[in-house]
Image (cartoon, grey):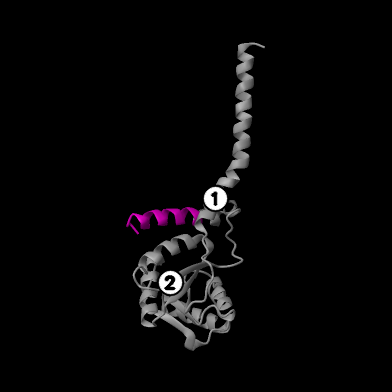
Amino acid sequence: MTTRNRHQRTGLTILIILVAALLFGLPLLMRGIGGLLIVADPLKKADAAVALSGDKGERIQEAARLYEQDYVRTLYLTNVDVVTVRNMESDANDLGFPYKKIFVTEAVVSNTVEEAKAVRKLAEKRQATSIIVITDPFHTLRTRIIFRDQFRGSGINVQVRPVRDHWYRSNTWWKTAEGREYTWQEYVKIFLYQFGIF
């Protein structure tokens, strides 16, 4: 075998190894990227469930499950606008929350940082000692970072829980445009928050 043939075979072998590593390694890497965003604190009883705004009702459904299972006694909603809040209150009531156990933040909010600040004020006003914040799986890491940061020194325990049976999965997120968009947005927003930009 000539030196040239030997180099060609070596090059082909390296190429095969690289392609195999890519085929087998890429899904593991992508799963890890999605999995890092999903956190779920151990579920313990709390004074209130906090259903963050911005979804299609799954967060309120999750809060209603926790209420039904006796994990929470009340529901906190974040105020984005009058119509949205009324719809959220109505949905929560339909799912089993009595209106007298539903409370809305005073401040109008437009992002997670504002939600955390508004929820802290409401929780302190209601003398809560613990809350369970419910959001989409891909949003849980950023929610935990922001809420624990904004609740520092309050004495209020913050648990973060993802919506169950959600479409976002760590092992499939990259297969849809929606999954890719939300994943990369979360990493960018976490970076911006950590550096005080957002």
Residue under numbered circle 2: 157
Q: Separation of disc 1 and disc 2 at Cα? A: 28 Å
What amino acid is labelled 2 in the image? Asn
What amino acid is labelled 1 in the image? Gly
With 88 as the anchor, is 123 left or right in this view?
A: left
Residue 159 x %, y %: 47, 69
Q: Please rate how many residues cluster around mark 1, counting C-alpha atoms within 10 Å: few if below 14, some from 14 to 19, many from 20.
A: few
Q: Which mark is residue 154?
A: none
Q: Quick one: quadrant of the C terminus? A: bottom left
Q: In the structure shown, which secondary structural element does the residue marked by tag 2 occupy?
A: strand
Q: Residue at x 56, y 73 (%)?
A: 62
With 45 as the anchor, is 20 left or right in this view?
A: right
With 188 as the anchor, is 23 left or right in this view?
A: right
Q: Residue at x 54, y 54 (%)?
A: 35
Residue 108 visible in this rendered orientation of the protein: no
Residue under numbered circle 1: 32
Q: Which residues are magenta?
A: 182-198
Q: In the structure shown, which secondary structural element does the residue marked by tag 1 occupy?
A: helix
Residue 101 x %, y %: 48, 85
With 13 as the anchor, is 196 left or right in this view?
A: left
Furthest-right residue in this view: 1
Instruction: Determine whether 14 is above or below 101 in the image.
Output: above
Q: How many marks?
A: 2
The answer to which quarter of the image holds residue 43 is bottom right
**Majority secondary structure in the magenta region:** helix
Residue 14 x %, y %: 60, 27
Instruction: Determine whether 5 is above or below 139 in the image.
Output: above
